[in-house]
Amino acid sequence: MQVTLFRALRSISIDDEIAQKAVEAVEEHIEMAVGQAVKPLENKIDTLMAQIATLSTKIDTVGTGTQTAISNMSGEMKSVKWVSVGTTGFIALFGAAAGVVAKLIL
């Protein structure tokens, strides 16, 4: 665009220096306008990035809580297993003792 504008200005007998300054002024205006147009988008991106960071933290927290709950459940299951083994052992021992006592009585 700069070359086209410069040539157009030169074609109507505008001095090289003035044509170059006009092209530079238009470039600055375009850069400023684009910068202003992009600013709201940059703000939205910054907001989205902050929301993603917050969500990531929440996901990490949920993951940690889930791991803790699973670990606790695993510990509880081990306790239940040992109570079950102990109870079974006690019943077997009591049954054997009752059998011995029954033989002694008979």
Image (spheres, rainbow, N blue to C red):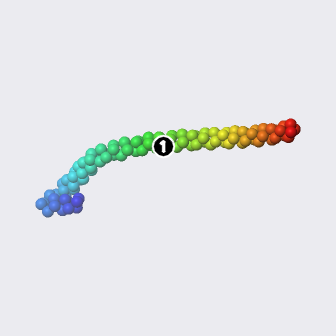
* Element at label 1: helix
Question: Quarter of the image containing the C terminus?
Answer: top right
**Residue at image x 50%, y 41%?**
62
Residue 59 position, x and y percent, is: 48, 43
Question: As drawn, is 104 to the left or to the right of 68?
Answer: right
Instruction: Out of 81 and 75, give the one closest to the viewer.
Output: 81
Three-letter residue code for mark 1: Ile
Closer to the camera in the image, 104 or 3: 104
- The residue positioned 57% from the left and 40% from the top of the image is 69
- For label 1, the residue is 59
Nearer-the-camera pick, 45 or 80 = 80
Tell me if I can see residue 28 in this picture.
Answer: no
Quarter where residue 54 is shown: top left
Q: Nearer the viewer, residue 98 or 52?
A: 98
Vertical relation: 11 (above or below) 80: below
Q: Position of residue 78 (x, y in %)?
A: 66, 42
